[in-house]
Amino acid sequence: MKSNIINNLNKLRALMKERNIDAYIIPTNDFHGSEYVGEYFKTRSFISGFTGSAGTCVVTTNSAGLWTDGRYFLQAEKELEGSTIDLYRSLEPGVPSIFEFLNQTLGDKGKIGFDGRVVSVDFVEELKNKLASKELEISCQEDLVDQVWENRPGISKEKAFELDIKYAGVDRVTKLNLIKEHLNKLSADLLILTSLDDIAWLFNLRGNDVACNPVLLAYAVIAKTYVKLYVNEGVLSKDLINKLNSEGISVLAYNDIYEDVKLLKDEVVVYQKNRVNYALCSLINVKKVINEVNYTTILKAVKNETEVKNAYYAHLKDGIAVTKFIYWLKTNVGKIYIDEITAADKLEEFRREQENFMGISFETIAGYKEHGAIIHYSATTESKIEVLPKSFLLVDSGGQYLEGTTDITRTISLGELTDQEKLYYTLVLKGHLALSNAVFRNGTTGGMLDILAREPLYNYGLNYNHGTGHGVGSFLNVHEGPQNISPTPRASYPFQEGMITSNEPGIYLPNEFGIRIENLVLCKKHSETNFGKFLCFDDLTLVPYDIEAIDLNVLTDVDKVLIHNYHERVYNALKDYLTIDELNWLNSIKEAI
Amino acid sequence: MKSNIINNLNKLRALMKERNIDAYIIPTNDFHGSEYVGEYFKTRSFISGFTGSAGTCVVTTNSAGLWTDGRYFLQAEKELEGSTIDLYRSLEPGVPSIFEFLNQTLGDKGKIGFDGRVVSVDFVEELKNKLASKELEISCQEDLVDQVWENRPGISKEKAFELDIKYAGVDRVTKLNLIKEHLNKLSADLLILTSLDDIAWLFNLRGNDVACNPVLLAYAVIAKTYVKLYVNEGVLSKDLINKLNSEGISVLAYNDIYEDVKLLKDEVVVYQKNRVNYALCSLINVKKVINEVNYTTILKAVKNETEVKNAYYAHLKDGIAVTKFIYWLKTNVGKIYIDEITAADKLEEFRREQENFMGISFETIAGYKEHGAIIHYSATTESKIEVLPKSFLLVDSGGQYLEGTTDITRTISLGELTDQEKLYYTLVLKGHLALSNAVFRNGTTGGMLDILAREPLYNYGLNYNHGTGHGVGSFLNVHEGPQNISPTPRASYPFQEGMITSNEPGIYLPNEFGIRIENLVLCKKHSETNFGKFLCFDDLTLVPYDIEAIDLNVLTDVDKVLIHNYHERVYNALKDYLTIDELNWLNSIKEAI
């Protein structure tokens, strides 16, 4: 029995009873719709004991449930044991969704509570829609978990800093003017911005309030006549505040935005509905709201000249680190003890040796053999296994450098492979190469390119159940929009020169092995002809593929040329930064195909 | 001066004046939204003198304009000369659209007239939208051109016939029951069907009211409790009417539907808004209308077992005819006089030799050299040129057989080619092969596959400005939905086993040459694995590619295998139906690559 969990649930139920709340919802989120959240925001983890990165807890007067997805079924089962909380395996047959559960559990009337700051407007709209047959009351003013949570970590207020123009490339005032021009075009008065990477990008600020994402907790209002930035006290230095003020930016207390938006009345307000929290939105009472993708998201995705130049440099440094790691791993496996955690640590060590390394860009996925088949595997001291001289170690990792963010996956052969392992590695590589080397017309979206990465696998009746690519920030979040590459016919955003996107096909055989190969690619102009403008990709990532895992029979001559050219490029880029042994090994890779 | 055109315009203006109509619109359409229209419906051609297949004429009190697209600029210029009608080149820079023209031309108030039976609801909605700033009156009850047109051809009332079950595969009653089940699912009462191919398919009827399309002019109402078919008198034999009646189908006069729909009141009515004419829709005054793609269109696209079996047979016959034609052309060019028209006639002759040939499925496009670059070229006695023993003849043609509809393009080399001609032919062929041999997951749409056909061209900064594929009927219209293959990120309909689609990439160099290679492909199941269900295409078309036009240096080993396998298949299929000389030639093609 997990008495602390049960005690906390009962305390929460007592608070709910005082307020006549029938069901209280605790999602995984901060006030900004962030993908990763700081310690302060881990209310769902605190109340349920389930520590995975995704899940929602619902507590009623006499039951409690936790909804999470397939990545976390095993972990959640274990962590919820003895907690009195039922596990609901989302999207599995026969398992009710949260809305279905609430429909079944509540009577004709019901009062549902949650902290309105940690859910989106979309969520509340869906809730009302799905429970339309009931007389529903919503209580969203209180964070009840806060009243239960003794010794809750404080909200993060880490020092933020200005990103030098030599990294940002474009100054704040210029960026703000672009937003103001955009507001003019929309005949709108102001933009409300709450997503942390958008704010960090727009103001050329970086912070440390969220693990792996160099952002600071902040809100912003950009009006045609003023700019307000809301941050926690002490986060910005006095000098920085003065500088911001001198540029016409008012710096206010983090929570002041909730009062300020109440004063809006005749303004035309722009915000992205699914990225602004419900509590904030419900305080805005104006005649007209324009709901669109944050314009900053689109500007941010198209890297400027400085960011592009720096991206190549960041990837050179990251390439040195990862290439050294792979050589170390291949030469030491079977000789010294290595497990999934020590391997990840060693890789981080290599990255730390690089100048301007600011930390990893997401928690390293290092999955050996069957663990490689778990798409979001994260080794724990319980789950970790030893890495032995056979089969594959899949390593998906990335670094934050002042010059840019990296994200790379290599599947590393550590000894003899089966024919199936080699065939599947080669099919994944063929798709990866086809996408990297695609030429496409201006206006093409990721939904139209995705098939290039999957076709070699499809031919064998194989597939992978994740997207092929996501946008990547410039010393910012490792996942960003608006572009992506995925097998959806729905509109995705057209590629533009300067966008950085991942190219990461894979194949996963549960309980056997997993393969994924990932480079980041920069979208560039290919040509302009009578037939229009054509774009292509340029590989940023500089780390060799695993030639020992390649089945040569499955390669075409074109594939071979592409592999050789890439390895030649990697060799030439890294050759001044490697030991003789590393260099000989890299040369042998280059010469092999 | 074209006095007949000017006289007719003035007569039309007199009628407009009597009715206070400021602008009268004459589109190219029949009452059914058909792609091709019968002689009776060629009002736009009559009033303007422009005979192209697409265009809209607008007549005002003191001017007249004709809007058409890039395919017809040259032809329209010529045909409109001296007519007092201005040519508006649609989508060219600075050229106003019809709506913009009306906005500029009409004052604050205005009355616009047209025959409501030849425009869609969508058109009228757009008209109202775009002219929202004006006080607008619409007059749609009269076909004023009819009152001007002396000796107008009568509306076509050709005999229709029943398509035998050995061709249709599924009987009428079963099809009607599927519609009724669908209405039940929608909680709707009746479906109004006005598109001619949907009606022909649903009732297993074929007719002869539209050139190349074996359809009959008809409307239909399929209700849960009754079925009504509206056709012109004499079109169906008494026996056939008796048979239909015995199956619960009432046969009524063609125009009776306009009275019948006025009686609808409490019914929930289903129709496809952009396929039902405005006049008919505006008579329907019910509480609820469901607008969706005609369910018949979806059912019709998925060919049944009988249709699939017959499609192979139709393509065998068509393959014999076209292969014989190509051999004839290659052996006679330069020896006897051949021009674009006589070539097309010769091809039709070969088709006529085949059993159950019912006519061509669209007007043959036979374009020699620079005429091949005109995508919808149709040779006239003025435009036709002699076919000589060099460069390419592009021939896009098709046949209607009781067993199915064919559509094939071959670009035929007639002598020495330039390196560029060979390279471009090979790039088009590579894209065509990549698409034909694609394997893809269930749920994939044409928008996701299109890149496979274009990628070899994109690599050289080349492209073609048309879709890659369209659905094809079974002894029905050569263009049908809902699926297509085109470079649009928007939703297109997912492929399903049994769909027949064209695969026709091309390249067009204005004033030089054009290349297009087209097969019809059947969507089939490829495999079902742990990773889901996979689909693929099977070539229906059985006509060799032009090996003399291939640049071998650009082919991969995989390309070569695909070409050889296809030619082996063509050879084996046709070998019993060719002369010794034809067979030797076909064998040499098979052995060459």
Image (cartoon, coloured by chain):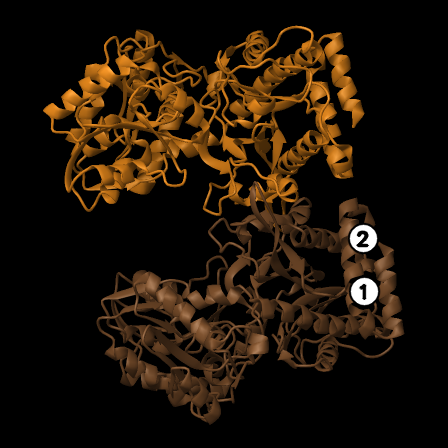
Chain colours: A orange, B brown
Residue marked by disc 2: B419
**Mark 1 packing: few (<14 Cα in 10 Å), some, or many (20+)?**
many
Give the image quarter of residue A420: top right
Number of numbered discs = 2
Rendered location of residue B163, percent (x, y):
55, 80
Task: Report the side of A463 relative to A200 (left or right).
Answer: right
Foreground residue among B71 and B245: B245
Foreground residue among B355 and A575: B355
Give the image quarter of residue B32: bottom left
Rendered location of residue A379, percent (x, y):
51, 16
Which quadrant does the C terminus of chain B fall into?
bottom right
Task: Report the side of A249 relative to B557 (left or right).
Answer: left
Task: Report the side of A51 relative to A458 (left or right).
Answer: left
Residue marked by disc 1: B571
- The three-letter amino acid code for the residue at tag 1 is Tyr
Task: Report the side of A260 relative to B63 (left or right).
Answer: left
Same subunit under labels 2 and 1?
Answer: yes
Q: Is residue B61 visible?
A: no
Foreground residue among B182 and A85: A85
Q: Is residue B157 above or below residue A365?
A: below
Give the image quarter of residue A389: top right
**Mark 2 packing: few (<14 Cα in 10 Å), some, or many (20+)?**
few
Residue B403's disc is none
Rendered location of residue B156, percent (x, y):
48, 87
Chain ID at mark 2? B
Give the mark, 2 or 1, whose residue is nearer the N terminus. 2
